[in-house]
Image (cartoon, rainbow, N blue to C red):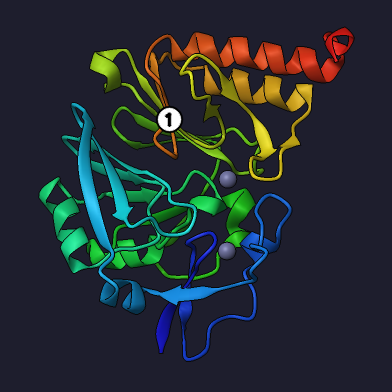
Amino acid sequence: MALWICQACGVEYPETTEPPAECPICLDERQYVPVSGQAWTSLEKLSADGYAVEARKVETGLFAITNSPKVGIGQQSLLVQTPEGNLLWDPTGFVDETGAQLVRELGGAAAIVASHPHMFGAQVSWSKALGGAPVLVAEADLGWIQRDDRAIRSWSGDLEILPGVTLSTVGGHFPGSAIAHWAAGANGQGVLLAGDTIGPAPDGKWVSFMRSFPNKIPLSAAVVDRVANASTRRPFDRLYGNFGGTIDTHASVVVRRSADRHMAWVRGDFDHLT
Ligand SMILES: [Zn+2]
Ligand SMILES: [Zn+2]
């Protein structure tokens, strides 16, 4: 028996003797099965191969939790610390006892939430390693769960999961794509954990909104407008994507400006430049 992990996306599967036939998350048009084909690893194998969990302080009250080497898509998980408990956001595809201990020393997790199914990672294993912390999955994306567990709870809309930490489903990339607003972040100016609902550009001055980042599938003007409006209802100055990209300052303005640019392009305003 092994806990199988899809090598391409890093999402965990139920404990079985043989690996699953396929990964529905990778077969979907928003992700991909590598040219080399579907491949599987397991928590046990990753552990034996020396994979580890690392923690790095990003700002006061916020830690980046990563796997070394990277697993699957290789997301950067974020741990938001509050006096009432922590949020583990976009959990990585690997956790072991040493990694869980690292997070326990930072206060553990009161809740585990992935921004969308690509970021489910080893969410149930993380929950079990952290004393059964609830795993919240957006109602609209419940069908993407691969490893079910009694720790999983469904949610939708706006949910203040911890005082000053509010989850919102804003859609776009997935119908249940979520953001987390952390009011105390960025020295009280507010932080948005955006997953890849909103993707920071390399220059830190723009963001993008996509149905699929690897396959470059766009979203319509109406959807991008909706996502930008829903994401900027609460004030924030800084934005974190799920791969270490950030918009360090004026991030709310950047989201609006970038949405306006996207809308103008898909509307055809700049067709004379092509
Ligand atoms: Zn996969
Ligand atoms: Zn994604």
Label 1 CA crowd tier, 10 Å (few <14, some 14–19, many 20+): some
Q: Quadrant of residue 15?
A: bottom left
- Quadrant of the snapshot with the C terminus: top right
**Residue at 52% across, 12% down:** 254
Q: Would residue 149 be found to the left or right of residue 267 on screen? A: left
Q: Is 201 placed above or below 155 here?
A: above
Image coords of residue 171 (percent x, y):
63, 36
The relative height of residue 230 versus residue 78 in the rendered view (above or below) is above
* Image quadrant containing the N terminus: bottom left
Residue at label 1? 245
x, y percent for residue 61: 20, 31
Residue 206 in picture, x, y percent from top left: 55, 17
Tally of numbered tags: 1
Ligand 2 closer than 8 Å to the CB at disc 1? no
Q: Quadrant of ligand 1?
A: bottom right
Amino acid, disc 1: Gly
Residue visible at 44% across and 39% down in the picture: 242
The residue drawn where x is 58% and y is 41% is 177
Q: Is residue 153 above or below residue 58?
A: below
**Relative image position of residue 75 (x, y in whole percent):** 42, 47
When the figure is inspected, residue 267 is found, relative to residue 162, above or below; the finding is: above
Q: Is residue 125 left or right of residue 178?
A: left
Q: Secondary structure at mark 1?
A: loop
Which corner quadrant of the image does residue 257 belong to?
top right
Outermost residue toward the left in this view:
105
